[in-house]
Image (cartoon, coloured by chain):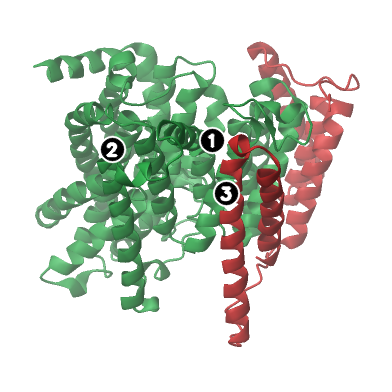
Chain colours: A red, B green
Amino acid sequence: MFLGVGLWACWAAVAMSLGSLQSPGPGLYPLILGVAIAVLGAVLVGASVLSQGAGGEDTVSTPRSAHARAVAAASVALVAYTALLPVLGFGPATFILLVVLLRLGKMGWGAAALVSLILAAGTLFAASLLNIPLPVGVMFPQTDV
Amino acid sequence: VSLLDNIAFGFSIVFQPANLLFAFLGVLIGTIAGVLPGIGAAASIALLLPITFGMDPTVAIIMVAGVYYGSMYGGSTTSVLINVPGEAASVVTALDGYQMARKGRAGAALGMCAFASFIAGTIGVVFLTFLAPALSKVALSFGPAEYTVLLAVGLVCASVLATGSRVKSLVMVATGLLLGVVGIDPITGNQRFTFGTIYLLDGLNLVVLVMGFFGISQVLMMIDEGAGKGGIFPASMRLRELLPTREEWRASVGPVTRGSFLGFLLGLLPGGGAVMASFMAYAVEKKISRHPERFGTGAIEGVASSEGANNAATAGAMVPLLTLGIPFNVVTGLMLAALMIHGIRPGPLLVTNHPEIFWGVIASMYVGNLMLLILNLPLVGVFVQLLKVPHRLMWPLIVLITVVGSFSVNSNSWDVFVLIASGLAGYILRKADFELAPLVLALILGPQLETSFRQALVISDGSLATFVIRPIAAGMLGFLAVVVLGVAAWRLWRPPSASPTSVTAPRDPKVSGQ
C-alpha cells in the first residue's frame, strides 16, 4: 500500500512539472490530473498514518502473499521473457516461460516440457496460418528506441 | 411500426449464420468465464479483443455482448454449488442459493437462476429496445460541455459506488486518465509523457494494457492463491429436479419482476451495474417479504431477485453505450474499445450510421438469452465439470493468449514489454486493494474526456461556468451531488459490519467487473 502511495506521489510530481512547464494547451489537463492524484495520494497517506496512530493492529494490513516465492519466480520469468524474446525468438523463449509456469503449477519436468512444446509449437503454427508475425529472434526486430 | 421494422431488421442481421455462430460462441465463452472463479467477463473480453480485430464489427460486438450477459448466467452456478461466486454480481445469489443446495434443492436453485436470468434478461432487452432509440435523439443535443460533465460524473460515480475504498478508486481513475494522455496531443501535436521514445508516440496501446491488467495480473493472482486448489467439487448433487416446484415459482414471480425493473434502472446509471443491482434487489425483497427471516437460509426469492437484477442490469448498461457512446462500467467500456478498434464511435449517431450494429446487437441479446437458457439448463452439469480443471493449467494459456494477442496488434516487441509491465503493476495494485476496473474505464474514456473538456473551454471562451450553467450539465452535476451525499450518509448511518459482502468470501470479485 505504501509502495502504491509512493508511486502516485512520484507520478504526480512528473505530471505537475510537465503541466506547468509546457504551454497551458497540452499541459492543462495533465496538470489537473496530477494535482488530483497528488491530493488523493496525500489523503491515503494521511488515512494510513491516522489509523496507525490509533494503534490498531489489523487496521493497516500489509499485503502478504501466501505463495510469495512462486509469484516472485513468475514475475522474474515474465520479465526475463521480455528480454529473451528479441534474442531467442518467440518459439524458444515461450517454451522456456511455459515450462517455468507449469513447474510453478507443480507439474513434473517431463509433462511440463511436453505441454510447453506442444503449446509453443501449436501457437507458432497457428500464427503462421493467421499471418501474425511473431519475432523470429537474433534479428532483433523493432527495438528502435 | 418503424420500431417493429427495426427489430425485424435486427433479427435479419442476427440470423445470418456467422452472426448466429459468434453469438453462440460469445454466450458459451461467457458462461465458461462465469463458472470459472477469477476469470470474469472483463478478463475474458480483454483476452478476446485481439481476436475481434479481424472480425466484422457487428460480429465482434455481438460476440462480446454475448460474453457479458453469458457470464451472468455462469456466475450463478458456482455460487449455488460451492458458495464461490464466479462473478462479483453473483455474490448475493450465493447467500440463499448455497443454502438451498445444502438443503438438497441445488437443482431448483440452478433452474431458478437460469429462468430468472432468462426472464429478466429478456425484460431488460425489451426496455433497451424501446428506450435506446429515444435516448439517442435526446443525446443528439449534447455538446462538448455536456459530454465533459457526463464523463466526469460517470467516472466519479463509478468509483464512489465501487466496493472498495473510494479514495483508492478515485486515484485509479485519475491514473487511468493520465495513462490515456500518453502520446501526441490530439489538438496541438505536442509529445506528452513519451520520454522521447518513438514507441510511445502513438500512446499506450489500449488492448495491450487491458490484457496486462486483466490477463497477466490475474495469472499472478492465481499463482498467489496456490497451485493446490482446483479440484473443489460439491459432494453430490442431483440435477434431475432442475425445475422449481409450483410453489417456488409462485414465490419467485414477484422478485424476478421487481429485480428486472430495479436491475435495468441501476444498469442505466453511472456507477450502477450488475453488482449493485443484485445487492439492491435482494435488500428490497428482504424488506417487503412477510418472512424476512427466511432470507439467508435458502429462500428462493433471494436467488430469483438477485439473478433477475444482475441480468437486467447488463441490458441497462448497454443503453448508455449504444446511445451516448459512454460506457459506465468496465465491461461495456471494453465493448467500446472493441468498436473503436474498427473505427466506429458509438454515440447518438450509431442508430442512423450503423443500424446493423445497433439493432443487430439488441436483437442478438434476445436470441442469446434463449441460447443461454437452453445451454444452461441441461448442460449445467457439464459446466460444473469445468471446476475440476486445475486452474494452474490456465496460467500458461492466459500468458500465451496475451503475448500472441499483443503481437497481433502492432507486431512490436515493446508491446510485450508493456503487457508484462502492466501485468506486474496490476498485480501489485490489486494486492494493495486498488481496483483495476476504474483504472481501465478511465483509460478508455480519458481521451474523449480531455477532448470534450478542451472543446467546451474553447467554445465558452475559457469560462468554466459552461459546465454549470447549461441545464443538462447542471442536472448531471446535481445527480452526482445526490449520489455522493447519499453514499456518505448511508455509510455514516449504517453500522460498518452490516455490509452483506462480509457474509461470503468470493475468491476474487475485483477484476471480474460488473
Q: What chain letter is assigned to the residue under label 2? A: B
Q: Which residue is mark 3?
A: A33
The amino acid type, in three-letter code, at marker 2 is Ala
* Residue B317 percent across, percent down from the top left: 32, 40
C-alpha separation, residue under disc 1 versus residue under disc 3: 26 Å
Q: Which residue is mark 1?
A: B46
The amino acid type, in three-letter code, at marker 3 is Leu
Which dot marks residue B315?
Answer: 2
The mark tally for this picture is 3
Q: Is residue B294 above or below residue B413?
A: below
Q: Please say whether residue B383 is visible from this viewpoint.
A: yes
Q: Name the residue nearer the viewer: A17 or B77.
A: A17
Residue drawn 76% across and 49% down?
A75
The amino acid type, in three-letter code, at marker 1 is Ala
Q: Is residue B261 left or right of residue B328?
A: left
Residue drawn 56% across and 61% down?
A40
* Residue A129 percent across, percent down from the top left: 66, 12
**Camera-side mark, 1 or 3:** 3
Disc 3: CA contacts within 10 A as few (<14), some (14-19) or many (>=20): many
Q: What chain letter is assigned to the residue under label 3? A: A
* Residue B366 percent across, percent down from the top left: 24, 29
Image quadrant assignment for residue B377? top left
Dot 1 and dot 2 residues touching (CB under 8 Å): no
Circles 2 and 3 on the same subunit: no
Q: Secondary structure at mark 3?
A: helix
Residue drawn 27% across and 30% down?
B139
* Residue B369 percent across, percent down from the top left: 27, 33
